[in-house]
Amino acid sequence: MAKAKTKTSTEEKLEKQDINLFEVLNAIDSKNYAYYDALSAEQQKKIVPYMLVFWISALRGSRDLQSYYLQSTNHYANQYIFNEFVQKNPKLQWLMLCAASPGLGKQFHLWIPHIKDRVAKLKEPAKVKDMMEYYKKIYPNNDESLLAEVAVTFCDQHKRKCYLAEKFPDLKLDDIDTLNQVLTDDEIEQYEKDYGNI
């Protein structure tokens, strides 16, 4: 029977070491696809793709670079990372996060605040004032009138989604998004008339 290999004190120390978030972000910025494999199994468990999507999608830098990271993170990671099959493969999630980076090296990333849980789950409508505060934190350098316009548009769309979530409680959030995009205000009004609500 083969003798089990004993670990060196350095290997044991590395396994016990916590993950440094900023080192992880730097590995993503550098498109270091091999970084994940270099971690111990315990360290790999501390990589949280959900949190990293928030971190890498926002950064301090030129407007073009901010836009690139936001769109690229959504394209390469956010829209797939929580797929039931992708979730079973943490290494694939890591590769997707690295693919989102343009590979320009270390960037200064910002934490995106969360929208209130009840608002995110369409249990209550978003308020313009709250959304303004939310967008100011994400885009501190943008014109306040533009942010106000975006907040109002978001709240109008969110109100429709809350209405659809209430009318069709069995639909998933993605389906409500799709329904919101295809239905017009006139069709919603007609639906209400047909059911005697107007």
Image (spheres, helix red, strand yellow):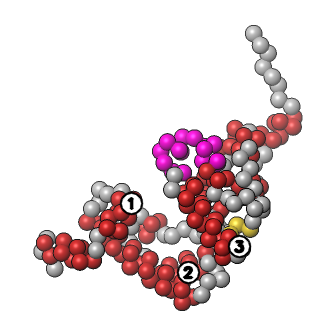
Dividing the picture into quarters, in which one does residue 29 lie? bottom right
The quadrant the N terminus occupies is top right
Q: Nearer the viewer, mark 1 or mark 2?
A: 1
Residue beneath label 3, please? 60
- Give the residue type that dot 2 points to: Glu
**Left/right of residue 161 with respect to residue 11 in the rendered view:** left
Query: Mark 3 or 2 closer to N-term?
Result: 3
Q: Which mark is residue 133?
A: 2
User: In terms of secondary structure, where does tag 2 sit?
Assistant: helix
Q: Is residue 42 magenta?
A: no
Q: Residue at x 51, y 86 (%)?
A: 148
> How far apart are the two marked residues, 3 and 2, measured between alpha carbons?
18 Å
Residue beneath disc 1: 173
What's the amino acid at mark 1? Leu
Q: Pointer 3 and pointer 2: residues touching (CB < 8 Å)?
A: no
Tell me which numbered mark, 1 or 3, is placed earlier along the sequence: 3
Q: Which residues are magenta?
A: 81-95
